[in-house]
Amino acid sequence: MDNFDLHNHSTASDGLLSPTQLLELGARHGAHAMALTDHDTLDGLEEAAAAARRCGVRFVPGVEISVSWGETTVHVVGLAIDPGSPDLAAGLRSVREGRLGRARRMADALATMGVPGTLEAALALAGSEQRLSRTHFARHLAAAGKVRDTQHAFDKYLGKGKPAFVAHRWAGLEEAVGWIVGAGGIAVLAHPARYGLKPLGRATLLEEFKRLGGEAIEVVTGSHRPEEYATWRRVAEEYGFLASRGSDFHGPGESPVEPGRLPPLPASLVPVWTRWKH
Ligand code: AMP
Ligand code: MN
Ligand code: MN
Ligand code: MN
């Protein structure tokens, strides 16, 4: 089997391992090719590419873009993008610039619930204002003993509809797909099972994504439960999407699947890597 793992995070966004540590871990687990797909940033790609060369792993430069689709936040992964694309870089910068203001509002909400000081603590974990994510808040809440673990921080405070959730405008779907395609990449709808969409909303999103130039969806991902794979296999077949496979790894002990350790894609699907593997 081709062991391609095309969705991973590093300390350049909300992962716990450096790009080098991430590539080394994937290589140990037998990954043949890996993408780094940090949220709204290309910062880790150069380091990851160098580490991949040392480890004998084929490297796929990537990114995971935060998108607002109506009231729903969806994630679009760009694969095999040109990291030098000025339009992609400018677009991602504009998305990142919203993170500090949103984080302030999350911290204010937490303070009114009797949990002060979270902005400073999350910032210390993130290392930069433009990297601030809910994951850093969740890690702080867990470390401070406010919740049992990071998952619980989302369930109690940070998830959609919870008291410290702050609605935010990310990139538009058309913009995000445009930046990816303009950078020579392939746009992949990340973990489609995670958006809580009803059948009509789901169909509308998939059709719009395809019309805008989206070519693939994630089927086998650490962010889907294994029993969800079959549903999204059928969706990929029905809409004619290429299929992607990626662990969505964030850190040891925090993510359900380690890099390079997912089951294979169902044999009936056309893997996204057929688009660039010659
Ligand atoms: P943000 O971009 O700041 O909204 O943070 C989104 C990140 O938080 C995702 O990429 C995941 O890493 C994490 N996340 C989102 N929802 C959950 C959840 N329900 N449970 C655990 N982690 C989550
Ligand atoms: Mn994340
Ligand atoms: Mn995601
Ligand atoms: Mn991800």
Image (tube, rainbow, N blue to C red):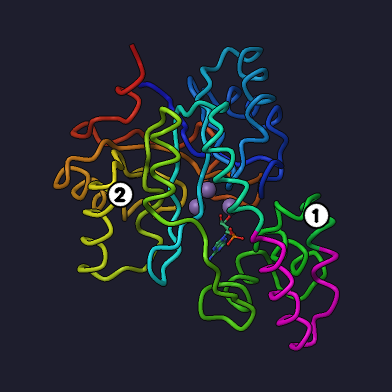
In the picture of the structure, the residue carrying the numbered disc 2 is 229
Q: Give the range drawn in magenta.
A: 98-121
- Number of marks present in the image shown: 2
Q: Residue 106 colored magenta?
A: yes
119 in relation to 8, above or below? below
Horizontal relation, residue 116 to residue 221: left or right: right
In the picture of the structure, the residue carrying the numbered disc 1 is 125
**The residue tagged with tag 2: helix, strand or loop?**
helix
At label 2, the amino acid type is Tyr
Q: Position of residue 35 (x, y in %)?
A: 52, 30
Residue at 17% in and 46% down: 239
Q: In which quarter of the image is ligand 1?
A: bottom right
Q: Where is residue 202 in the image (x, y as percent from the top left)?
A: 26, 62
Q: Nearer the viewer, residue 259 or 110?
A: 110
At label 1, the amino acid type is Leu
Q: Position of residue 89 (x, y in %)?
A: 58, 38
Residue at 53% in and 28% down: 61
Calculate the distance from the C-alpha at mark 1 to the C-alpha at mark 2: 33 Å
64 in relation to 146, above or below? above
